[in-house]
Amino acid sequence: MTTTRIAAIDVGNDSLKGVFGKLESEVNIPNVIARDIEDRPIIGIEELDAQSPLDGIHIRVHSPTLKDNNAIYRVGNLATKSTNSTELDPGSSKSEEDQTLVMLFASLALDAAGHEGFKKNNKVIEANYTLGTGLPLREVKEGKDVGYRSKLLGSVHQVEFLVTPQYQGVKVNIRFDEVKVYPEGFAAFINLVMDNNGNIINKELIDKRILIQDIGGLSTDIAVIKDRKVDDDKAQGFNLGVSESLELIREEIRSRHGVELDSRRDVVEIITKKSDRNHIMVKGSRTSVHDIVDRIMLELAKKQYRHLRNMWQKNSQTEICYFIGGGSSVLKEYIKTLNNNLDGYNIDFFEDEKESIWMMVHAYYKLISDYVRKSEKADKVKEEQKLAKSK
Ligand SMILES: Nc1ncnc2c1ncn2[C@@H]1O[C@H](COP(=O)(O)OP(=O)(O)OP(=O)(O)O)[C@@H](O)[C@H]1O
Ligand SMILES: [Mg+2]
């Protein structure tokens, strides 16, 4: 019997989120890659291995599914430091970009390298996964999930770690026993109504008509759920996320206060921290940036609210709208205030920002575990029937 490991992976435009096995490990990698155009400087092995593998993902990827086979990439944090790094273009198709696959394979290889259960010869790991993942509703509607799935299933994909802390020279051969590709909006709904054992946990919600507005880093998707299904025709996606607004805040802090923040992540930290929110230090003095943040975030919240209103008009029998995704955590208070002053829709947010951001991947995990459980059961029944016959 082969050992297969469960993997649930959400390749978000902003970051990849993955959970593995019996949920004992997870990864979060910024969705940024850079083709290696110059050699990564060789640093002393001790110095290198003192770092986390996550901060130095440097890999060669062999896979017939890639348009560019055998290319070398820096992935995640390491790529953000490169001058030629690429982020996904919101208008592109996730299922057709090498970037999606490179991210997916990198995250699996990282998990495999840190996992004891796979067969390993020298530095070659044979990794078998049962994968649950997703694509935007639009791509599933166009039928792209079918090709995406068969590309993954049909071949062996190899990730070779190059100058990566702790994993230098390790090669991981990735095979999939099964791949399920779920539509993103539907997955969020599943997470709301099902627990990790496949039981229904929210009987009241399951037959309601609901909207799910997922505000991510670069995009917003609104799913319409009716009769326990997503209504493909009604769902809508917009190329509007929270990243652009975070960038604007960062620029204005630089021009007004002369303070250079390293990344959008720093902006998120400033506007979400529990104590001293919306304050920065300028030359050692505590300084408020509340006005900058409020103006820019309110602007974005208004745009998001317009989309909500529009969707509600087209789906007048909606009972509730859930806001999920990282953007929803950042915009929560602004959208709530607008809603109180304007239409007063029945809307809900998730208190915990991690829950909001990991919603999709937890749903994939529930769905793929449920699938594994059911197919194991079916196998067992078949075994028993075989045994009974042979008696
Ligand atoms: N605690 C947090 N950790 C990370 N990002 C956060 C946090 N709180 C808010 N954010 C913001 O949420 C955004 C990421 O949201 P999310 O992970 O939902 O996007 P994504 O799924 O990767 O992108 P998309 O939905 O556009 O494909 C980031 O731009 C970040 O600024
Ligand atoms: Mg997302």
Image (cartoon, rainbow, N blue to C red):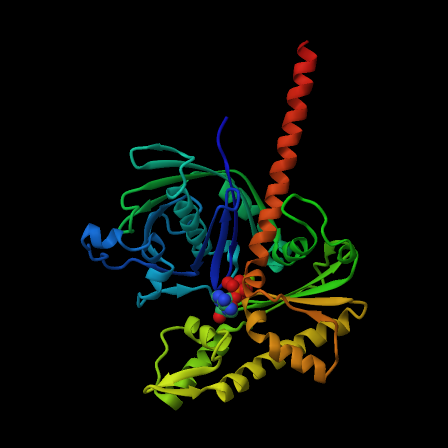
What is the total number of numbered labels drawn onto the structure image? 0
Q: Is residue 342 left or right of residue 283?
A: right
Q: Who's the residue at 21% across and 51% down the image?
A: 46
> Viewer-proximal residue, 66 or 230?
230
Residue farthest along the front direction in this orientation: 275
Residue 298: image location, x then y, percent: 58, 83
Q: Who's the residue at 50% across and 35% down the image?
A: 4
Residue farthest along the top direction in this orientation: 391
What quarter of the picture does the C terminus occupy?
top right
Q: Is residue 293 above or below residue 377?
A: below
Q: Is residue 372 left or right of residue 173?
A: right
> Viewer-proximal residue, 234 or 125?
125
Q: Is residue 50 above or below residue 317?
A: above
Q: Tell me if I can see residue 90 in this picture.
A: no
Q: Who's the residue at 23% across and 57% down the image?
A: 40
Residue 16: image location, x then y, percent: 47, 57
Residue 218: image location, x then y, percent: 51, 69
Q: Is residue 23 above or below residue 122?
A: below
Q: Is residue 94 above or below residue 302?
A: above
Residue 259: image location, x then y, percent: 35, 84
Q: Is residue 355 left or right of residue 125?
A: right
Q: Who's the residue at 26% across and 53% down the image?
A: 50
Q: Tell me if I can see residue 49 in this picture.
A: yes
